[in-house]
Structures are given as structure tokens and as C-alpha cells.
Amino acid sequence: MPEPLSPGELLALDRAHVWHPYGPMPGRTDPLVVQSASGVRLRLAEPVHGRSELIDGMSSWWSAIHGYNHPVLNEAARGQLERMSHVMFGGLTHEPAVRLAARLVEITPEPLEHVFLCDSGSVSVEVAVKMCLQHWRSLRRPAKRRLLTWRGGYHGDTWQPMSVCDPDGGMHGLWSGVLPEQIFADAPPAEYDPGYADALRALIARHAEELAAVIVEPVVQGAGGMRFCSPAYLRVLREACDAHDVLLVFDEIATGFGRTGELFAAEHAGVSPDVLCLGKALTGGYLTMAATLCTPRVAEGISRGEVPVLAHGPTFMGNPLASAVACASIDLLLAQDWRQEVKRIEAALRDELAAARDIPGVRDVRVLGAIGVVQLDHEVDMAAATRAAVGEGVWLRPFRDLVYTMPPYVTGDEDVARIAAGVGAAAAAG
Ligand SMILES: *Cc1c(COP(=O)(O)O)cnc(C)c1O
């Protein structure tokens, strides 16, 4: 083992060489150095604002639903490591990937039946878009190549996903002339609005000839603004897509695996998409992996084409280690009363965040499933908000005008209360 780096050395190297998400180079603010993590706690390499341990209010961006260092997931990883951590997926197959695919088909809405396992959420959206475009090309309707979405969304950072992110938050101005130009409806209102539903229908009808697919995050828009909207819009989209020969893609990379109170957010509306993207919590936050599922109709369309194959195949496709942990994470989730745990956290966040409404500068407080959001009437001061949360012993990562939490489902009541106190402190300071 090499000599461990001191926190000072580590930060100096980090600043000089390492990009962080949405960060400048060299870095301008010091990240916190995490030494280990267990349960819902992150242990820091040295105390910060008097805290050497932080309660994690972020589940590492929606992913660590069972908390860190979980014995069952550790065992799954260790067991698989002893057999093989990776083999190529071209011409070879293995039990972890096959089991995972079958399991995903079993737990997701019918008629999703075919599974493409890939590296990350953004890639799963690329694959979803490729599936839809190739489907229409195969059916000799190449004009159907654009996407429609509503504003306020987030679908990832590679090119096709970026093109359907919110045009303002997604910095489309920076990329004009480079990004494919997609069709945008207004952001969906929180409550069902028949006028908005009509506008959605009309937009889909008007562009039907050039539309390959509609892509949305069902019920919760995550990194595009942490907005919730009526599940009834999903039925409107399903009907309009069916009426006009347009495919429907649900991006459940953030909402999947119970976060909104249903196993998949589409279930709030009883609606099934033609293509479904999963990621984030898929491996319980252990390893990078995502999945794109589609229906037999989509697959058949592709197979009837001049090029009758789905032309995509990442090097680490179906990675056995990630697949084995994903299977263990899904089993662990379904073996417990996860619905009750999410409800418990939802009720606690509703109670504990209610007081945040009275903080000056707070515009809105909203809770759905294990997601709590405090929206400010101004851009959050990241440094001040982070410092305030850390002072309460809580890890949060606010953005834009939002201070929010989506804790691991294993977070106990006292820790949820502390997270809520952290959110309040961050909102007051930021
Ligand atoms: C995070 C996210 C993505 C992108 O996933 P990555 O693994 O970060 O590439 C796509 N869509 C949604 C809804 C997400 O929340």
C-alpha cells in the first residue's frame, strides 16, 4: 500500500489535477475529504466546522438507498469479485447480467421485456434515443427523428440527453448550433391543468410527423429543478403518443426503486412507457450501471430494418460486479417493507420541514416520497449553505435556488430530523 496522503496533500493534488462535477479547473473551493462511509454517515478525513461525521442527506445523488458499507451488498460484491469482476459481453454471457435483466423485466411495468445494460444514466438515455430513432428508420420513416419534452427536465450530460434538458438550466445557449434542436412544452404545472394537457396534446399532434419520441421524467423532475407534477399528465402523454404514432420514453433514473413512494413513478398513473431508463439506485450506489428497457414492439421495429441490430455495445456492458450488486440491492429492497420506510421518511420530512416556510427568502417547501425540497426566492449561496448544513452535522449539496434532501431509506427518525434541521439551516444561511 502506498503511504496515505495527508488531507493537505490530497487537496493540493485534487485542486491541481482533478475535475469535479460542473467545476472549474483548477478548483476554486475545497471539497470535503471523505475517508469512509457506513450506514447513513460519511466520515471525514479531518473535522470540518467541528464535525468529523456527517449524516448523508443526498444518498450520493439518489443512489445509496440502503446506506453505505452494507453487509449484504458488500458480500455480493466480494462473492462476485472472487469469480470475475468483468468479462466482455460480446459473444459471452453470465449469470449476474442475465439474472439482473430478468429481475428488471419482472419488477417493471408490462410490456417492457428487453434490457440493455450500460454504464451510466446518460448512456442509457443515449441508448433509449437510439432505440427510438432506429425503430422509425427501420420502419422507413426517417423523418421521425426529433424528441419532444417539457421544460424543467434533466436527462444527463452527454449530447442527446443534454438536448432534452431544460434549455435554460441545461445551458443550451452555450451549445446552440451544436445540440440537436428538440421540441419543448412548458414545464408541467404541479396540479392537473386541463389547459396544459390540451397544449401538450396539440404540440404532439402538430409535430407528429417529425417526432420519434416524447421523453420525460415521470412525476418528479430532479436535477432540472426538483419539481413535482400530477401523474395524470403521464396518461395524457400515453394517449397522445398512441394516437400519433410517437414512442414514449420515461427516464426513471432518479425516480426508480421506490423514491417517490411507488417502485417506479409511472405506477402513480398506471401508465407504461415504450422505453424506460433506470440508473442511480440500480446498484444501491455501489457501482456505475444503468439499464434501458424496451417493449417487444420497439425491438421488433429495429429488427425489421436494413441494419437489424441495435448498434450499441459499451466495453463494460453488463459488468458482472455491478450486475451482482444490483441484483442484491433489488432483493434487499423488495425483502423489506420499503413502501413503509419511504412513507415514514415522507411523513417526517413533511413535519420537520414545515417550519422552513417561515424562513425569510423561502418561496416553497414540498415533499414527495423520500424527497424534501426547500425552494428559495434567490440563488443559493453554496458556500454559506454548505457551511450551515455541515455545522448541523449534515451533508447537503444545494443548487440554483434549491436546498433539498433525498436520504437513504434506512435513515432513522432522529437522523431525518437532523437532516431537516440541516436543510432549514442551509436555507436560512444561503
Ligand atoms: C442523474 C440522471 C441522469 C444521468 O445519469 P448519469 O448516471 O449521471 O449519467 C439522467 N436522467 C435523470 C433523470 C437523472 O436524474
Image (tube, helix red, strand yellow):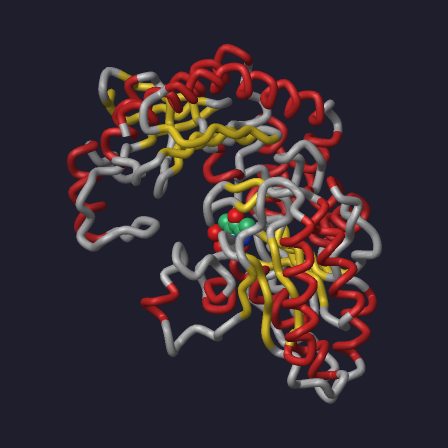
Decide if residue 89 is on the left or right side of residue 119.
right
Within the image, what quadrant is residue 111 found in?
A: bottom right
Camera-side residue: 140 or 281? 140
Residue at 24% in and 23% down: 48
Decide if residue 47 is on the left or right side of residue 208.
left
Camera-side residue: 55 or 330? 55
Within the image, what quadrant is residue 394 found in?
A: top left
Decide if residue 330 is on the left or right side of residue 20.
right
Camera-side residue: 138 or 46? 138
Q: Is residue 127 above or below residue 16?
A: below
Q: State the quadrant of the N terminus.
A: top left
Q: Is residue 288 something one can see in this rendering? A: no
| x and y percentages locating residue 212 in the rendered image | 66, 73
Q: Which residue occupies the extreme top position in the image? A: 414
| x and y percentages locating residue 34 in the rendered image | 33, 31
Q: State the quadrant of the C terminus.
A: top left
Residue at 29% in and 29% down: 385
Residue at 60% in and 61% down: 317
Decide if residue 359 is on the left or right side of residue 310.
left
Q: Is residue 183 above or below residue 224?
A: below
